[in-house]
Amino acid sequence: MGPPGAGKGTQAKVIAERLSIPAVSTGDIFRANVSAETELGLEAKRYMDAGDYVPDEVTNAMVRDRIAEDDAAQGFLLDGYPRTLAQVEELDGMIKFTGHRLDAVVCLTVDQDEIVSRLLQRAQVEGRADDTEDVIRRRQELYVEQTEPLIEVYQQRGIVVEVDGMGEVTEVTNRIFEALDVLPES
């Protein structure tokens, strides 16, 4: 978890590869559907272009289908989900049904000015039309309003690991694995 631009997607790919589990990224799923111009993609695009979250029912269905796939049987890493309290409840039901459990919630902390800079640079490099400064600021507002409360829920469960997301990718990755190594086995 962490605000948009904190490096979640970058770290998710590295961690998932090292742990030999799939990284389940709602952003990647949304963009793939937008590119393919599926019905879901066209619906998701409306929200993404405005900087809003895609509705829970659409997101939940995609995640539920993805974590039920064979390659996720031994575990998975979620990137960009859950983002709302309702999604936390939905995820709890999903993992109970599949027999998985949440081992940790890694929360990346990053300076706000750094986030804006990162996302504007990413928009240029990757050609992401949805990453304008206004949309970035809107996503930050939504994160504070809707997603930050999830951290408290997971802190109460004792599974939050806060990691400084500033610095080179390998530095942040090392900090994440160091933090995960100190987690008690559940």
Image: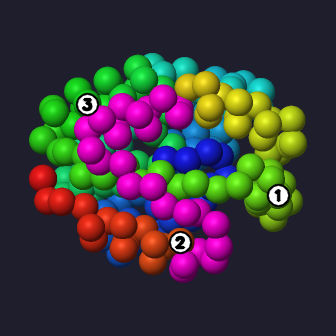
Quadrant assignment, res 133 = top right
Residue 21's label in the rendered image is: none
Residue 6 shows up from this direction:
yes
Label 1, label 2: how many angstroms apart (C-alpha)?
18 Å
Percent across and percent down for residue 144 are 62, 32
Q: Name the residue nearer the viewer: 53 or 182.
A: 182
Percent across and percent down for residue 134 are 86, 35
Q: Is residue 111 left or right of residue 16?
A: right
Residue at the image point whose x is 61% and y is 25% from the top: 145
Question: Please, what is the three-letter code of the amino acid marked with disc 3?
Answer: Asp
Display coloring = rainbow
Of tags 2 and 3, which is closer to the observer?
Answer: 2
Residue 128 shows up from this direction:
no
Asked if labels 2 and 1 touch by Cβ distance under 8 angstroms, the answer is: no
Q: Residues within 10 Å of mark 1 (few under 14, many from 20)?
A: few
Percent across and percent down for residue 62 are 42, 34
Q: Residues within 10 Å of mark 3 (few under 14, many from 20)?
A: some
Residue at the image point whose x is 80% and y is 53% from the top: 113
Label 3, label 1: how many angstroms apart (C-alpha)?
34 Å
User: Does the magenta-highlighted stretch encompass residue 160?
Assistant: yes
Question: Please, what is the three-letter code of the amino acid marked with disc 1?
Answer: Ser
Label 2, label 3: how many angstroms apart (C-alpha)?
28 Å
Of tags 3 and 1, which is closer to the observer?
Answer: 1
First in sequence: mark 2 or mark 3? 3
Residue at the image point whose x is 16% and y is 33% from the top: 96
Residue 172's label in the rendered image is: 2
Q: Name the residue nearer the viewer: 60 or 151.
A: 151
Percent across and percent down for residue 44 are 63, 28
- Residue at which label 3 appears: 92
